[in-house]
Image (cartoon, grey):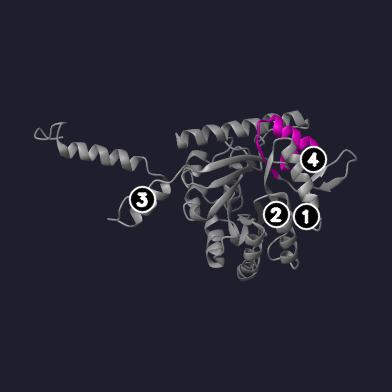
Amino acid sequence: MSTCESTNSPRIHRRVILKAGLASLPAMAWHSLSARPGTALPEKKKPTQFQIACMTLPYAQFPLERALTGIKSAGYSYVAWGTTHRERDGKEVPVVAPDAPPARAKDLAARCRDLGLAPLMMFSGVYPEAKDAVEILTSRLRQAAAAGVPHVLTFGHTGGSDRRLWIERFKQLGPIARDQGVMIVIKQHGGNTGTGAACAEIVREVADEGVRVNYDAGNVMDYLDVDPIADIQKCAEEIRSFCIKDHRNFPADEDCGPGLGEIDHYKLLHTVAFTGLKMPLCCENIFAPVIPRPTDPAGVDALARRAREFLEIVIAGLQA
């Protein structure tokens, strides 16, 4: 500062005020502002209502009932349904079969809510390009509607997907989803739909509020070795939920629980921390890297609790 500019200078006061105001803008607002120089400062939106859920998937080797009670004991208020569970007779049983009547999903949702767990997401169990994808996804949407589950999750084949067929089918399914009060969310799973940017391009071409993006940072880093922090900037406006998993390239190349890998979750969630939306964060992988997974369900409970507490700390810091 020159000798002619004292700390009482109006210019300095304006500079300090502007700096403080700009520092409070979320990443999406910064990006918007920098992309359009000279535009008015965007109004800061309300904080995102992050809903931290645990999937039953980490408990797949245990009965579904034990998964639900474990998730509740780990301090969660939300749950996402996995795919199958090994029941007491040793058989692998679907959480909800694709062709099950909607009443089956409604009954399971009631069991979850009786435990104090609101269900937020269920897997479709079918690739969008599969021959019977429209039929199965329509069945899933009806199941989700009956159960009051807001999101049905789907994703593509790791070997690649037919982008044109996806768009055609999602344009057909979007209105069905909206009629049922449910949203189809597409996550990254390798191949040509392995990034958030690629999924967002499809969603934007479909142009239906019934179809949006689910972000899986672990998959983006795992399958394609793409930086999810850079990738999420390209799809943030389309994101409506997350499958939470982390990833490490060292000392082993493997997925793991949030905060145990190389992905910076402060930077990841900062991008969507002020959307004003409800946004499920569904913990898909909660395990520690390198060491064996627990064979006792109590060990899974402990890891589920750690994942929840980590995400709560991150969100509190971002929205403080």
Q: Which mark is residue 160?
A: none
Magenta run includes residue 197:
no
Q: Where is residue 124 drawn, in percent x and y?
A: 71, 56
Query: Which of marks 2 and 4 precedes in the sequence?
Result: 4
The amino acid sitting under disc 2 is Ala
Q: Amino acid at mark 4?
A: Leu
Q: Position of residue 50 (x, y in %)?
A: 55, 41
Check whether the beta carbons of the residues at disc 1 and disc 2 lie within 8 A of each other.
Answer: yes
| Residue 54 falls in image quadrant | top right
The disc placed on residue 145 is: 2
Residue identified by numbered label 3:
42
Whole-number angstrom distance, CA of label 1 to CA of label 2: 8 Å
Circle 1: residue type: Pro
SS category of the residue bearing label 1 = helix
Q: CA distance from mark 3 to mark 2?
A: 36 Å
**Is the residue under label 4 in contact with that under label 3 (CB below 8 Å)?**
no
Q: Which residue is mark 1?
A: 102
Quadrant including the N terminus: top left
Residue 300 x/y as whole percent: 72, 32
For the residues marked 3 and 4, what is the alpha-carbon distance in whole angstroms? 46 Å
Q: Is residue 101 visible?
A: yes
Q: Which mark is residue 64?
A: 4
